[in-house]
Image (spheres, rainbow, N blue to C red):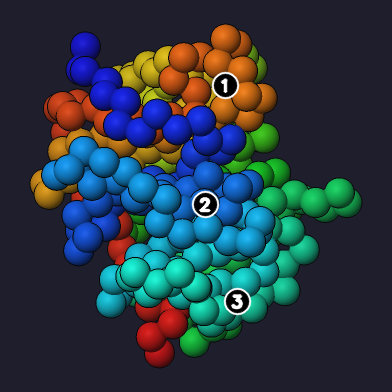
């Protein structure tokens, strides 16, 4: 069994959105409700709080083409320059609730989901480089982890409360999503699908909230591998390192009790050798047009 290394023994309420920044050569992730962005430098084996909002949750972020970070909060998209203490708003989106998971596409757009509110479900938006936002999927019960197949013809998106990951035909030229079908479903009691990534062999890794693990699926939706963690709520997963051979996983400690949530709840883990590598994530170009 591959070794699990606890690289940051944080006690994050909701550790999410791990993303490897190849320019900085470090891993970033957020604690969503705390509005905190962290960075881990594997060369020094140290992590630090990089940025924090004034109590506004950070639902997700992307890396811009020039290396800056694009932060998604509650209707606001802001640009964080490396080393700055203040993020500058660049786009406002008329969304009722905060953003959750986000991902850049090959053309620099960003797909960004919003959480359900008191009276309605969430939506998935497509944000264009010129700042135009369009709802592409309505009424999603917690839009979550997303990814692209290696041939860029399929787009995956998770609907957590439906216990499902869907696949769509993806049009790179327009960003259109069509022909929705179910890629995988999880059974009751088997954990809730959360964040995800697609590896170099075109397999999907899906984190399992309340399932204590991440599961690898082949392109036909069959599970072929599992990474267990000492945390019930495994929130997201990504690959990083210079050759993208390290698997990073974030977890949550929502009730503050590690006796029930697991000894590693709220921490960030690295698994150095899972037998496959990842690929760099696409970069957004929202604030550069």
- Kind of element beneath mark 3: strand
Give the residue furthest to the left: 243
Q: Give the class, few, some or many, for how many residues have Cα within 10 Å of label 1's Cα (few <14, many ≥20).
A: some
Label 1 or label 2, whichever comes before in sequence order: 2
Residue found 41% across the figure and 63% down from its top: 62
Which mark is first along the chain, 1 or 3?
A: 3
Specify the farthest residue to the right: 119
- Which quadrant of the view contains residue 237? top left
- Mark 1 = which residue? 210
Q: Seen in the image, is 261 located left or right of residue 197?
A: right
Q: Where is residue 179 in the image (x, y as percent from the top left)?
A: 52, 54
269 is higher (above) or lower (below) than 94: above
Q: Name the residue under label 2.
A: 36
**Which quarter of the rendering shows the C terminus?**
bottom left
Q: Do the residues labelled 1 and 2 touch (CB within 8 Å)?
A: no
74 left or right of 23 in image: right
The residue that appears at 56% across and 79% down in the rendered structure is 89
Which residue is pictured at 51% across the width and 30% down the height?
Answer: 11
Element carrying mark 1? loop
Above or below — where is 182 with respect to 152?
above
First in sequence: mark 2 or mark 3? Answer: 2
**In front: label 1 or label 2:** 2
Q: Percent x, y for residue 24?
A: 22, 60
Separation of marks 1 and 2 at Cα, in angstroms: 23 Å
Cα–Cα gap, marks 2 and 3: 25 Å
Label 3–label 1 contact, CB within 8 A: no
Identify the mark at residue 133; answer none if there is no mark.
Answer: 3
Write the residue at 33% across / 70% down. 82
Mark 2, residues whose alpha carbon is within 10 Å: few (<14), some, or many (≥20)? many
Left or right: where 32 falls relative to 97? left
- Quadrant in the picture for residue 210: top right
């Amino acid at each position: 069994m591959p070794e699990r290394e606890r690289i940051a023994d944080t006690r994050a309420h909701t550790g999410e959105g791990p993303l490897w920044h190849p320019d900085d050569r470090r891993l970033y992730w957020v604690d969503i409700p705390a509005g905190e962005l962290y960075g881990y430098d594997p060369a020094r084996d140290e992590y630090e709080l990089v940025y924090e909002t004034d109590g506004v949750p950070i639902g997700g972020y992307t890396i811009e083409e020039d290396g800056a970070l694009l932060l998604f909060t509650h209707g606001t998209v802001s640009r964080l320059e490396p080393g700055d203490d203040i993020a500058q708003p660049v786009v406002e989106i008329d969304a009722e609730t905060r953003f959750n998971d986000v991902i850049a596409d090959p053309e620099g757009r960003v797909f960004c989901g919003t959480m359900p509110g008191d009276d309605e479900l969430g939506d998935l938006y497509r944000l264009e480089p010129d700042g135009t936002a369009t709802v592409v999927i309505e009424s999603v019960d917690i839009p979550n982890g997303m990814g692209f197949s290696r041939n860029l013809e399929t787009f995956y998106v998770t609907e957590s409360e439906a216990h499902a990951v869907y696949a769509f035909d993806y049009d790179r030229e327009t960003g259109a999503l069509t022909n929705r079908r179910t890629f995988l479903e999880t059974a009751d009691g088997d954990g809730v699908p959360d964040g995800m990534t697609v590896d170099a062999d075109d397999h999907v890794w899906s984190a399992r909230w309340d399932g204590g693990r991440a599961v690898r699926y082949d392109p036909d939706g069959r599970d072929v591998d599992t990474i267990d963690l000492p945390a019930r709520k495994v929130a997201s997963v990504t690959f990083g390192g210079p050759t993208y051979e390290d698997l990073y996983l974030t977890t949550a400690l929502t009730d503050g009790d590690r006796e029930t949530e697991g000894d590693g709840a709220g921490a960030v883990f690295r698994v150095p050798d899972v037998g496959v590598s990842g690929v760099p994530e696409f970069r957004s170009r929202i604030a550069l047009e």
